[in-house]
Amino acid sequence: MPGAGRKLVLVVIDGLTPELLERGIESGRVPALARLVEEGTYARGVTTFPSVTPVCLSTLATGAGPDVHHIPHLAWYHRGEERIVDYGSSFPAMRAVGARQAFRDAVFNMSHAHLSARATTVFEAVEDAGLVPASINFTCYRGRTRHAIKLPGLAARNRWYEAVYGPRRFFFFNLFESDETGAPLAVRSRVDGSNDAYAGAIGRWLVTRDGFDFLVFYLPDFDYASHLAGPSSPVDALVRADAAVGQLMEAAGGPDELLARYAVVLCSDHGQTHVDEVARLQDAYADLALLAPRRGDPGAADVAVTASNRSGMVYRLGRCPLEVRDLAERLDEVDAADVVAFREDGEAVVRREREELRFAPGPGGGWRISGDAAVLDEGGYPNGLERVWRALANPNAGEVLVSARAGVEFLDFGGRHHAGGGSHGSLVAGDSTVPVVAAGVDAPAVDGRPSLTDLAPLALRYLGVPPPASMGAAALEPAGV
Ligand SMILES: [Zn+2]
């Protein structure tokens, strides 16, 4: 049987840019990561739009874009439940939408209620093939095995789920642990990298027992440090992520032994760019009735505007006097808005600096384009057409999508931002480009550039499991169908 006995580890370092990985390796301070690059292939890949963690991790888990997995942004308007969802833009933003609701949405609803049931996850596909999937702290985790929550009293009081469906071996910030490992508490101090230390300890336990066929090893602390200090400075935080990967190597008896037992793919979910200005996207619609983030009445509102980090969405509600194009065109006057996208007559319309580009999938796999192609030039906005198309084709997305200008961040519902530090979410190359390192397995690459959507099917093929139909380029259909 092809692939029999093969095992693979996918390491995801949140927010790691190719530049910082390269600088870390040059500094000599990240020996485990350097070893993976030395043994494998290294490429610059492209992530999704919006380039924010819930959307990107859902793409990693499902091998598909937001058009298929349906997670639209960090903050969005849920049309079915007529309320704002925020997966944790910041603590004040979570308070603004209701802290308990935000926690429920991030930890439970995203993987179970919001993630499309038709998008098979890599964990489901691995377990369906009779193999053992494992994940540590990965927030898009839906799988086939029921796991009871470790804190049932707290769960009952807060209306958390009493159990979830995750990968067979499932470790999630001490809330769910499929096995007793003796790992330390995860949620002590993100600045000191306690989540990554927790992941390292669990990873060591799993590798020591050879306890999986496929492991997603997710390290969130780097992104946190990079938001604070900016994307060009925090080699220290990468040293901690490197130590966690080093723990996997030690557990195997050394890097050679780890790589003899497992193929290892390393990537990040999105990049980061410096931000030094902030803008409130809602201000562009101040003359309209805006939906309040908590207990707002959609029947009395014209629009819901959900902004977080470097992207935003505008939802046209029932009584709105303006058409979608009007909602988009008023952002021509807003300096913080760079690329603005919406759908019209079955095509995607993209505006930038008052120039307009229209496109739709053409026959035979290409794009049918009219207008100014430079609006989404490939150098500035890598894979821009496909990423915009897939973002707009998500039924949970706003009618208007906004990508922020370089250096600008949109305030979240709590009024928070990272000015002076780093952020991401936009279509620009710095937010969208991720390192992809593949050791022991050939990474697929179109023109030398892999997409984040490629990695789940890559892992499955390596394991000898046929990727499900929902993975890959399946969903590029004309708009409106
Ligand atoms: Zn981030």
Image (cartoon, rainbow, N blue to C red):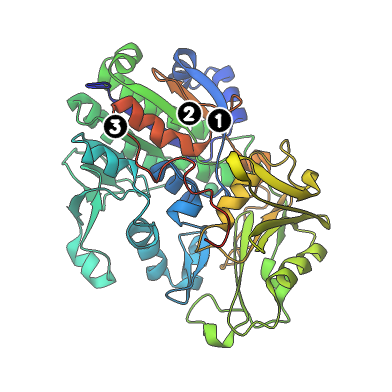
| Residue at image mark 2 | 239
In the rendered image, residue 207, in percent from the top left (x then y), is placed at 24, 26
| Residue at image mark 1 | 235
Q: Secondary structure at mark 2?
A: helix
Q: Is residue 360 above or below residue 182?
A: below
Q: Secondary structure at mark 1?
A: helix
- Is there CB contact under 8 Å for labels 1 and 2? yes
Task: State which tag comes first along the sequence, 1 or 3.
Answer: 1
Please name the residue shown 70% across and 54% down the image: 404
In the rendered structure, the answer to whether residue 274 lies left or right of residue 243 reads right
C-alpha distance separating marks 1 and 3: 37 Å
In the rendered structure, the answer to whether residue 206 lies left or right of residue 416 reads left
Query: Does the closest atom of ligand 1 sit within 8 Å of the Cβ of label 1?
Result: no
Please name the residue shown 62% across and 51% down the image: 388
In the rendered image, residue 303, in percent from the top left (x then y), is placed at 62, 76
Q: Is residue 383 above or below residue 116?
A: above
| Residue at image mark 3 | 465
C-alpha distance separating marks 3 and 2: 34 Å
Q: Nearer the viewer, residue 441 or 323?
A: 323
Task: State which tag comes first along the sequence, 3 or 2.
Answer: 2
